[in-house]
Amino acid sequence: MTATARKTREWDASADHDEILIGISSCILGEKVRFDGGHKRDDFLAETLAKFVRFVPVCPEVDIGLGVPRETIRLERGERKEIRLVAPKSGLDHTTTMSRYSDRKARELQGLDLSGYVLKSGSPTCGLFRVRVYDHNNVPSKTGRGLYAEALTSRLPNLPVEEDGRLRDPRLRENFFERVFAYRRIRNLFRGRWTLGDLVRFHTNEKFLLLAHDRDAYAELGRLVANARGKPRRELAETYESVFMGGLSKIATTRKAANVLQHMAGHLRKVIGQRERAEIATVVDDFRRGLIPLVVPVTLIRHHAHLNDVEYLVGQTFLEPHPKELMLRNHV
């Protein structure tokens, strides 16, 4: 079975989730669609992640008919400061064709209800950050964003989007996939008929995950939920989703995560002994000092929460925000 055909399989922390669709630049899955006939396969994405999601591969340049192999294209800044997509050797301008395609494709993907997107870094169509833009003197500056990436992020502002190159950073990788599965959870909440009680339960379960990222976002969402009665449902859902995903986009620091762990440990005080409390405190401190990864204290607290049936902690997504098989917290 190919990577693009694999289906999502169930995992313990999200028993009610449905298929998770991830948009991705085709070359990252190993498809030979690059200008030189090559690819940029990422084994972690194409193999490990593929066990939990179904990919939706896209290559904008092939889709508009540029072919493989093809002349290189790049972003250029015009006389009026506008950004153009140009093939420098032939002088062909693909800006209008690519812009129209990108808008159409972004609308199509919006209908698929994606949970995330991984783009090829540096690409004049797919690059998300620091894409080279050439001025009239042929001098490049890393200030651009690919035309397709721009249309995608404009159409789907809350969708978790990241570049393949940045995913080599353990913290950025963990943050991205944390957001992917969080986005799926909140989309599942709001896609059908939901009550204010459902929203309260969701907010309660996401408390410690939010606190590890952005305390202000958690507080803002708390006020929103507390004053939700009487608000239009669509407006409430849109506001909650926007603030929720915005808060999670901030990287969880070691200090914030350690504070959350200490707070969670407080909920175990009445059900575990002094020796166990001391062990948790030591492990959390070791994590704070950078001696052990996050997975160690999280596993210990989750063990005691389940063993002693501490329902409030068991329901916290912070303890398992994504499949443990991805081993994302082994490196942060």
Image (spheres, grey):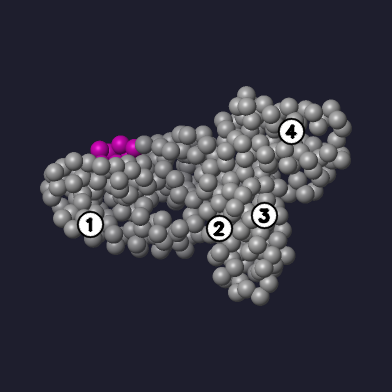
Residue contact at pointers 3 and 1, CB within 8 angstroms: no
Q: Which residue is mark 4?
A: 300
Going by the numbered disc 3, the residue's amino acid type is: Asp
Q: Which residue is mark 3?
A: 16
Name the residue rendered at 78%, 27% in the picture.
279
Kindly report the distance in space between the C-alpha atoms of the residues bearing marks 2 and 1: 32 Å
Which comes sooner in the sequence, label 3 or label 4? 3
Q: CA distance from mark 2 to mark 3?
A: 23 Å
Is the residue marked by circle 2 packed among few (<14), some (14-19), or many (20+) residues within 10 Å? some
- Give the label on residue 243, or none: 2
Is residue 247 depicted above or below 197 in this figure?
above
Tell me the element at label 2: helix
Q: Which residues are magenta?
A: 32-39
Query: Does the rendering let one see residue 20?
Result: no
Q: Which mark is residue 82?
A: 1
Q: CA distance from mark 3 to mark 1?
A: 46 Å
- State the SS at label 3: loop
| Magenta-span inclusion, residue 160 | no
Ranked by sequence position, the earlier of labels 2 and 1 is 1
